[in-house]
Image: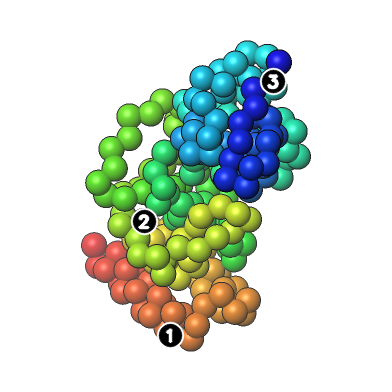
Amino acid sequence: MPFWYTFDMNEVLTCLERLREIALDQHGFVTSAQAVESGIPKVELPKLASRGRIERVSRGIYRVPQVASSGHENLALAVLWTGADEACLSHETALAAWAVSDINPDAIHVTIGRARRLRRTGGERYVVHLQDLQPSQQTWWQGIAITTLPTTIADCIEAGVPTYLVRQALDRGDRAGLLTQADSARLGAILTQRDALGAKA
């Protein structure tokens, strides 16, 4: 028999249906913590996985096959993999997501709080940055937490992303209305200063 539970609105759903409801907003993924918060016993997840109803993709993260592919699963998984509520896409990955430069990162960059200490396996393709971001520095892209374009460009300048790619982002971001004139001027000045210091080194 399937496991049934009742949530706040007294509507009875199966575990799989509830997991699918959560996963619809997360590119097909659901974490053990989210399942428990929704009233699903943690022990039910391995049972469903063993029956092939869901797929375990990482520690504490499952994929619900009934959710259609979005094409951004790898990015959503990277953020969930950290286990940090504040985690978001950042740096080169965020720049690529904003589609304002020709950058093509070979790893997925995510940012988490400075106090976090990750000891998780399976993150070989991830670059984790430690930074305490303000709420104003984060937003959403395709349902995934991400740094705003001004923050993304500032991080890329500091990380040493080639000047021509940053210039592309400033130009295209400005034309797309993703940057204010003040943002463009400030970031342009930071880039110029970086290049000047590099030339003197």
Residue toward you, 61 or 196:
61
Label 1 environment density (alpha carbons within 10 Å; few <14, some 14–19, many ≥20)? few
Q: Residue at x 68, y 41 (%)?
A: 11
- Mark on residue 2? 3
Taking 140 as reference, is 12 above or below it? Answer: above
Q: Position of residue 162 (x, y in %)?
A: 45, 60
Disc 1 residue type?
A: Ala
Q: Which residue is tagged 2?
A: 159
Q: Residue at x 37, y 57 (%)?
A: 160
Disc 3 residue type?
A: Pro
| Label 3 residue SS | loop
Q: Is residue 125 visible?
A: no
Q: Which residue is tagged 1?
A: 182
Determine contact: label 3, label 2, CB under 8 Å: no
Residue toward you, 3 or 183:
3
Quadrant of res 6:
top right
Disc 2 residue type?
A: Ala
Label 3 environment density (alpha carbons within 10 Å; few <14, some 14–19, many ≥20)? few
- Mark on residue 52? none
